[in-house]
Image: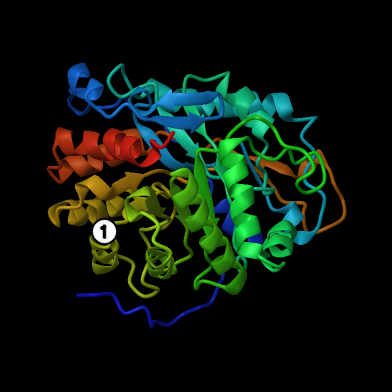
Amino acid sequence: MPYDSRTANNSLRNSRRDCLKKLALSGAGAALLPTAFVAQSLKARAATPAKNTQTVLGPVPVDQLGMTLMHEHAPSVDWSELYEQKPGPLAEIREEMLTNTAGLLDAFHKTLNEKTGPGAIVECTPIRVGRYPLLMKELAERTPVHIIASTGFWCEAAAPQHPWAIELGYSQDGVRKLADLFVREISEGMEDPSGEFGEKFTNIKAGMIKIATSNYLRPSERRVHEAAAIAAIETGAPVTTHTTSGGGLEEAELFLRMKADPSKICIGHLGNKDDRENENAYEYHRHLAELGFNVQFDRVGLSKYKPEKSAVQIHKLIDCGHANQILVSHDAVPYVYTNYATDEVSSEGWSYDPVDFTQCSTVLVDELKKLDVSDETLYQIMVKNPQRVLGFC
């Protein structure tokens, strides 16, 4: 039955710190990826359409990515500028940040083999909330895991919309100006946040458009979503979304009105109260898939998104014939800066969590196999679906 979007409970109960902390995962040991899962022939991989994705080190054929985690943050998230504060300083902890985060990504890589490796992540930190293109490039040079960066802006209610997004979005032809920024970051290179807004740009290109909605789609968020749809249509780049216990269907309806391709759009953060009422919104997930969108379970391992819970929700979609539209990830954040509530800027504001990028490739795979999900379907979800979504250049 179609999902009715007129539901209750629009409260955002988490403090800013709690919201950020819930993005991080606690460290955990991980076994090697089950042998049966990687029993896919190299010949089958070679048959994948030879499209490229855009990594921070340049274009890479999608059939060389291996298993791809579709929504991660590495190495950092920093909301300072959302509160009109200076971002956290990096110089004192830059080397520590690179070393530790590369180690976490290497741990993910080690759960894979030649048929599912080297592995990749979509780094979903958008403009001016801890996204440092040069830092991401250096991180990518230290690990075999491919890193795909994102353009876009974050949301309005869980934290304020970024001042630059407000400035662009509410100016004359604001949606077009936002879209032009996203297109530039995809086709030429991402902004360098060391300067004033839009003053400096790198030659490191984004390969994903990341946008976000609060519990409901707010006005400035709507402008950003419309701009994302335009940029996706003009560049072919995929879109991934943040939702907050609701908002995914409203996003989907907007993208359909804008005539964006739903097969290149990932409705994210699904797995808990996605219809604002039910912990397991099976019909909601099915409805999104029936509309043609990718259904993304990208907080696997967080407190309300235990792997066994995610596995059941994924299994329900597989049973409905939507295995080709399922994506997974962790939404993990190794480094978070939280001194944005005051004018004090100090490297002590950075906190480090030894997050676990291996939950999907180990624990979630095991849980799905307990539900008799086949090796072929696991390979489809973990490897082939990301290839389809990410290939555009």
Taking 10 as reference, is 291 left or right? left
Between 382 and 236, the one lying in front of the other is 236
Can you say whether 48 is above or below 254 in the image? above
Residue 116 falls in image quadrant:
top left
Can you say whether 94 is above or below 158 in the image? above
Residue 389 falls in image quadrant:
top left
Residue that lies at the very extreme toward the right in this rendered image: 343
Mark 1 secondary-structure assignment: helix
Residue 35 visible: no
Between 102 and 294, the one lying in front of the other is 294
Residue at 52% over, 20% down: 143
Q: Position of residue 38 (x, y in %)?
A: 23, 24
Image quarter hosting the C terminus: top left
Between 172 and 55, the one lying in front of the other is 172
Between 348 and 188, the one lying in front of the other is 188
Residue at 44% over, 35% down: 28
Taking 257 as reference, is 86 left or right? right
Mark 1: give few (<14), some (14-19) or many (20+) Cα within 10 Å: many
How many labels sit on residues? 1
- Disc 1: which residue: 289
Residue 329 falls in image quadrant:
top left
Q: Position of residue 102 (x, y in %)?
A: 56, 24
Residue at 47% over, 55% down: 241
Image quarter hosting the N terminus: bottom left
Residue at 57% over, 18% down: 142
Taking 326 as reference, is 353 left or right? right
Q: Position of residue 220 (x, y in %)?
A: 62, 68
Residue 108 visible: yes
Amino acid type of the residue that numbered disc 1 sits on in the rendered structure: Ala
Q: Position of residue 201 (x, y in %)?
A: 72, 37
